[in-house]
Amino acid sequence: MREFVYLSNVVTLKLAEEKCTGCGMCLEVCPHNVLEMNRTHVRIQNRDACMECGACSRNCPFDAISVQSGVGCAAAVINSLLGRKGRSCCCLDDSQEGCSSDRKTTCC
């Protein structure tokens, strides 16, 4: 499969190696294999492949990973291309129940 690369050197992904315990949860949830295990902890192997979905940071039980999710969210980009203004991956249409207004500006 072709490797996706978004804008080079602009990803907000950060890893605090001193906090990482090597549990591997981030490896399980990352859709683009941005991270890899390095003996005792995780390391970033391909930063530019990160779509900033936030799955790694939301699932890290030790807060070792941070990313400003929504910046490069693929679903938000698709919604924008479809002409859906002000929507992100959480809110596909204004009628969706359970969608709060504060979630329209950030990607889940």
Image (tube, rainbow, N blue to C red):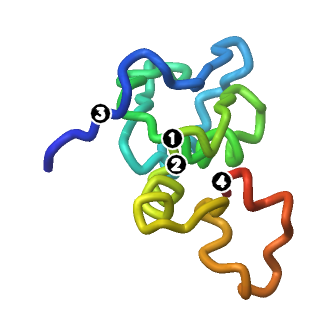
Tell me which residue sits at (66%, 66%) in the image.
Answer: 90
Other-residue count near label 2 (Cα within 10 Å), few / some / many at <14 / 14–19 / ≥20: many
Residue to which mark 2 is pinned: 73
Q: Residues within 10 Å of mark 1 (few under 14, many from 20)?
A: many
The amino acid at mark 1 is Gly
Q: Evaluate if marks 1 and 2 touch, with contact meaning CB atoms under 8 Å apart.
A: yes
Does label 3 or label 4 sit earlier along the sequence? 3
- The image shows residue 19 at horizontal and vertical percentages of 73, 19
Q: Quadrant of the C terminus?
A: bottom right
Give the Cα separation between the discs numbered 2 and 4: 7 Å
Alpha carbons under labels 3 and 1: distance apart: 11 Å
Q: Residue at x 69, y 29 (%)?
A: 66
Element on which disc 1 rests: loop
As drawn, 92 above or below 2: below
Q: SS of the residue at dot 2?
A: loop
Q: Which residue is mark 4?
A: 107
Name above or below for residue 25 compared with residue 90. Answer: above
Marks 1/2: CA–CA distance: 4 Å
In the image shown, does 12 or 1 lie closer to the viewer? 12
Identify the disc placed on residue 72: 1
